[in-house]
Image (spheres, rainbow, N blue to C red):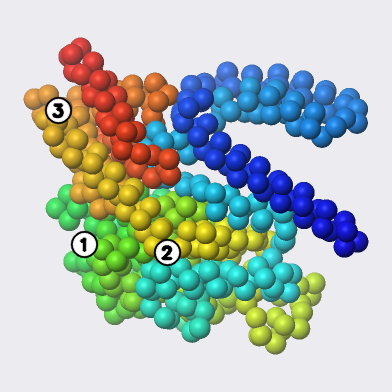
Amino acid sequence: MHTKWWISLLIITRILKHSLSLAKFSLVICGSLFQILHRLIPTHFKMFWMDFLKNAWTWITECQIVLIPTILCFIFNADIRDKIMPGVTHWQSPGYFAYFPANSSIAGFLGEMLCAGVNVVGFSWITSPAATELETIVMDWLGKALKLPDAFLSTGHGGGVIQGTASEAVLVVLLAARDKILRKVGEDAIRKLVVYISDQTHASLQKACKIGGIFPQNVRILETDSSTEYALSPESLSKTISQDIALGLIPFFLCANIGTTSSTAVDPLLALGKIAKSNGLWFHVDAAYAGSACICPEFRPYLDGVEEADSFNMNAHKLFLTNFDCSALWVKERNALIQSLSTNAEYLENKASQENMVLDYKDWQIPLGRRFRSLKLWMVFRLYGLENLQVYIRNRIELARKFEDLVKNDPRFEISATRHFSLVCFRLVPPHNNEELGNKLNRKLLDAVNSTGKLFISHTVLSNKYILRFAVGAPLTEERHIFAAWEMLQEKAYALLKRL
């Protein structure tokens, strides 16, 4: 038995060696052999796949026993290279600047591979103690790196848990907040519960409200504008809460943002937190994108006021070199989550859980089963260390600053929102201040550059203006890619303006 184990270990070691090369190759291949954004039309792609699946199913049902290398060679050449890769948008390409980044790294890749290899379903401590204990440890590590208050660490009444996405994180804290207030005012009062967000808050919160039974008319979407750099106004919030209380409604949940999706706006946490506390609201801070940057001392002030929050969330899979999915959530009162989400079926009972000796992360999330995601975060910390992670994040932000300078130096373009991190919002200035024409021009510019397959950017709308978003974050992006992207934008802009 031991001999077989050592043989298996040697094989795994060889696989790891080749996997490192494969990981590097896969990152490089995204920026060289394939276009970043596919050119496929949905109807054509479905017809293409129907034919492929028919042939593949015939092969699967009729194939004979052959050597694994032969099968792999066929799969990689006939299936992956020719069928799958043409339909992939390459998020790891150095020319990928759309949405927000989904960082991949060698450390994250190895952590993901270990997770797949051990393949535990760690819903409770007893199902795999290491999965629970490591998650608790790395979440405390990350919390300390962000200088979160001690109340968010596992040593107190709170703690951290890894969710799949920020959408899941905001859902579980909304449910915890809902149940906490309903235990106080009675379940029938759910129709009176009110949620407060800005018009820059991620749409996933509105979906969470639907799931949580919050009436749509009780979701207050407060307007922002360029005068506050699209941050939520404390005065507007306070006024709206007072009006709702006068109407007999029950304010119970506020979400603030550190780095909104459209423009990376930053809400004033301290002022908002004090309003939330004085009115008994659960205060959640969504730092899904920008939270990673706050491990750098110069960006940590953006989190000032987080001590007022009841929960805090950031995505390690955006700028923290941790492969998707890995969304870090901290709460000050873990019992609020547990009371809302715990399940105690007979087949889940065990001595350690019943005696409250351990944490069972199944009670901190929506599903029962959970992956060993902490391996990825642990591997990133262990292989890179905090200082190297800070250097990496600073480099992404510096590249964005260089792109911003290029935009500022071209009078045909303008910056549309303050750059806080590594996202630049800009647009082609409309001739004669014709905003309708300006929106059409920028939409055409977006389509023109994306259709080349050499770079990929996305858009948003701010103050009724169509805005281009340039998010720097792919690990392979270098200064030369920034300049190449800008040259492409200038070239396409020149062609559009020439035709006017």
Query: Hey, which quadrant is residue 20 in on the image?
Result: top right
The local secondary structure at tag 3 comes to: loop
Q: Is residue 260 left or right of residue 79?
A: left
| First in residue order: circle 2 vs circle 1 | 1
Residue under label 2, please give it.
386
Looking at the figure, which quarter contains the N terminus?
bottom right
Residue under label 1, please give it.
233
Looking at the figure, which quarter contains the C terminus?
top left
Mark 1 Cα shell of 10 Å, populated few (<14), some (14-19), many (≥20): some
Amino acid identity at mark 1: Ser
Whether residue 17 is situated above or below residue 195 in the rendered picture: above
Q: Are marks 3 and 1 in contact (CB under 8 Å)?
A: no
Q: Percent x, y for residue 429?
A: 16, 30
Whether residue 53 is situated above or below residue 98 in the rendered picture: above
Q: Nearer the viewer, mark 3 or mark 2?
A: 2
Marks 3 and 1 sit apart, C-alpha to C-alpha, by 32 Å
| First in residue order: circle 3 vs circle 1 | 1
Amino acid identity at mark 2: Leu
The local secondary structure at tag 2 comes to: helix
Mark 3 Cα shell of 10 Å, populated few (<14), some (14-19), many (≥20): some
Q: In the drawing, what numbered circle is on residue 412?
A: 3
Q: Residue furthest bottom?
A: 355
Residue at 33 percent across and 76 percent down: it is: 308
Q: Percent x, y for residue 418?
A: 20, 49
Whether residue 286 is situated above or below residue 252 in the rendered picture: above
Residue 302 visible in image: no
Amino acid identity at mark 3: Arg
Q: Percent x, y for residue 424?
A: 26, 42
Residue at 81 percent across and 53 percent down: it is: 8
Residue at 76 percent across and 77 percent down: it is: 349
